[in-house]
Image (cartoon, helix red, strand yellow):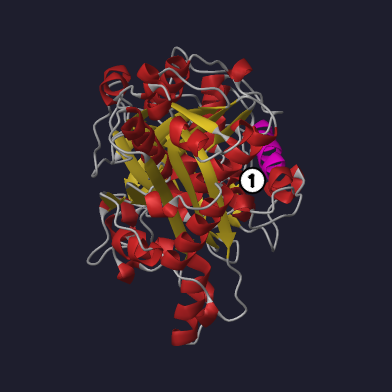
Amino acid sequence: MSDDAARTPVIVGVGQVNDRPKDPREGLDPIGLMEAALREADRDAGTGWISRLDSLAVVDQLSFRELGDLSGPLAARLGVTPKLCYKSTYPGGDTPILMLNEAARRIAGGEIQVAAIAGGEALRTAAQLAALKAGDDPSAHNPLRRATGRAGPPSFRQRYGLTAPVDVYPLYENAGRAAYGQTFAEAQAESGEIWSRFSQVAAENPGAWIRKLTPPEAIVTPSADNRPIAFPYNKLMVANSSVNQGAGFIVTSLAAAREAGIPEDRLVFVGAGAAAHEPGDYLRRDRYDRSVSMAVSLNRAMALNGVSASDLDFVELYSCFPCVPKMARRVIGWAVEKPATVFGGLTFGGGPVGNYMSHAVVGMVLKLRESGRKGLLFANGGYATNNHTIVLSREPFPLDVVRSDFDFQSEADAAREPVPELDETYIGPGTIETYTVLYERDGRPKFGVVVGRGPAGQRFLAKVPPSDEAAIDFLTDGKSEPVGSSGVAALGPGGDCVWNIKGAATGLGALPAGTSGIKA
């Protein structure tokens, strides 16, 4: 067997599991989900691969934090002692693709022969168990809210409601709509079309959590079953974390796969990846209508692997919230009419925090085995922070491509525009850079949040109280574009800044060079 074949990485086995116990006390915990998924992946690859593991990588989990690092306990469950055994540093959406990229490069470098990546989240069971103990409703025990909370007085960002990802991603959605030149109706129509296609993929996927075809209008229209969360997102437009899901996959060399007798039509080759990230502080970023690190990750991965959008048969564009696939599809030129998922998206496929992209890897491998030649996996994590893209194919990639360094942070940093100064005490005139409105569970506005820009370009935050019905309507009724409109930040009760609308006159000037004008 050639040296190239001994170092060419291929995915040989994939597995996933949905756990729906009638009694949460009988449910699988994250380690149980991971074990079940990897044993399924081993069966998919023809068995015997788990015992040969050189590397076991585990996606960090949130649902049972008390269990700690599960990499060692999982290895013990599997009865193996791989020389590399570790978990990701955080449960971010990009981590499965990072770990796949790491495994492929190690195989290509001759460091290891067989690797497994797995993750699992029992968020639904965790909430139900907590509710049983407290004697209340599972909705009061969201592990994601618990993970993003902190002890002590609220921070500046928390005072203005920017606590969890669901509070921050709408800032990108609303800024993007204005930059694309869309009306509110056009932007919602784009979200509805993308998400409805996700539901169609999920409906045809046995591994998806919600298998129900949902029309666009049902997704974008608030209702009792589709309550508003953070403007303009309703429940059916955000990641569904109330799931118990595990997924994993096994990567080895082409030589090892052939020696095991795996048919060529079941092998999926791993190409080069590319990663770049935004600053961790989402208020210290250059803009909200696009992400330079996302663009660098996508463009670099496609360039390294020598592919364009027309070469791709399938894509998975991360979909915690609509703004992410909207931005990503504009970067790569992916038509809105084409499905942007192979698994079903984080609303319908399921949103197991950092492990969604493991399910996407499973979905992509299954799709490529059926038809097509190439697929792109784009992962996003944090608060629109972390980006990692990789390409899979039915054909091998040159080893120098696979071994490419995936860190393109310096390129992203060099392309980033100057970051506005954040003024936490600003009072005075300004314009709306972006905004959202947060809602109570019964659908009433909690308050609006404005990210403003002062005359000198400084960035500030301001609230719109729910009692200011005219201002809330201005931000949400879609009759005019709030982004760029003028107002005044004034000191309000409790010392927080309150936004007073002066009118809808544009204050931010022309769209920046390079901004897409693509509509839905």
Q: Quadrant of the N terminus?
A: top left
Secondary structure, mark 1, is: loop
State the residue in front, 137 or 257: 257
Magenta stretch: residue 85 in it? no
State the residue in front, 261 or 407: 261
Q: Is residue 74 left or right of residue 24?
A: left
Look at the picture and state if 443 lies above or below 320. Answer: below
Looking at the rendered structure, the kind of residue marked 1 is Gly
Instruction: Give the residue at x 37% y 27%.
Output: 293
Instruction: Give the residue at x 46% y 62%.
Output: 35
Q: Which residues are magenta?
A: 186-198
The residue beneath circle 1 is: 344
The location of residue 191, given as percent across then percent down, is 64, 38
| Main SS class of the magenta portion in the image | helix
Q: Is residue 83 left or right of residue 215?
A: left
Q: Quadrant of residue 411?
A: top left
